Every structure is written in structure tokens, then in C-alpha cells.
Amino acid sequence: MQDTYSMLREFADSWVMLAILLFFLGTVVWAFRPGSTREYEDTGQIPFRHDDKPADTDAETKEAL
């Protein structure tokens, strides 16, 4: 009878590695799926959405007092 470590090690070397590989491939397919470009472009523009004028620092300073 195998001890617990050897049994778990054998399981991890075979099935868990296969599960990790399938998860990785699924993630890559999800990231590069057709139609996702628009979503990623929108997400990439978040920092620039309100970039037309600087923040009003005087009003923030008065509120803090």
C-alpha cells in the first residue's frame, strides 16, 4: 500500500497538472475571443474618461477644513 504522500504526489503530477493546463488554455481562449476587443478598449480608456479639465483642488481643500 502506498503511503499518503506518494499517492497525493502521483495524483498531483497527473490530474492536477492536466487541470491547470486546461484552466490556462481556457483563460487564453477567453482573453482572445472574438468580440472582446471593444470591451478591453473601453476598460483601457477608464483613466482618461474625465481628462478634459483638471480637478478643482481649491474646493477639495475648503471641504477638508
Image: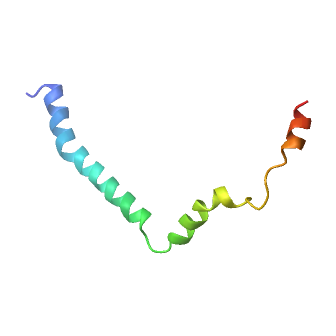
| Count of labels in the image | 0
Q: Is residue 19 left or right of residue 13?
A: right
Looking at the rendered image, the quarter that the C terminus falls into is top right
Could you say which quadrant of the image residue 3 lies in?
top left
Q: Is residue 44 above or below residue 15?
A: below
Q: Is residue 6 above or below residue 59?
A: above
Q: Is residue 16 left or right of residue 30?
A: left
Residue 60 x/y as whole percent: 86, 40
Could you say which quadrant of the image residue 1 lies in?
top left
Q: Residue at x 56, y 67 (%)?
A: 41
Q: Residue at x 23, y 46 (%)?
A: 17
Residue at the extreme left: 1
Q: Residue at x 54, y 64 (%)?
A: 40
Choose between 28 and 43: the one closer to the eye. Answer: 43
Q: Residue at x 37, y 61 (%)?
A: 28
Residue 2 x/y as whole percent: 10, 28
Could you say which quadrant of the image residue 7 lies in?
top left
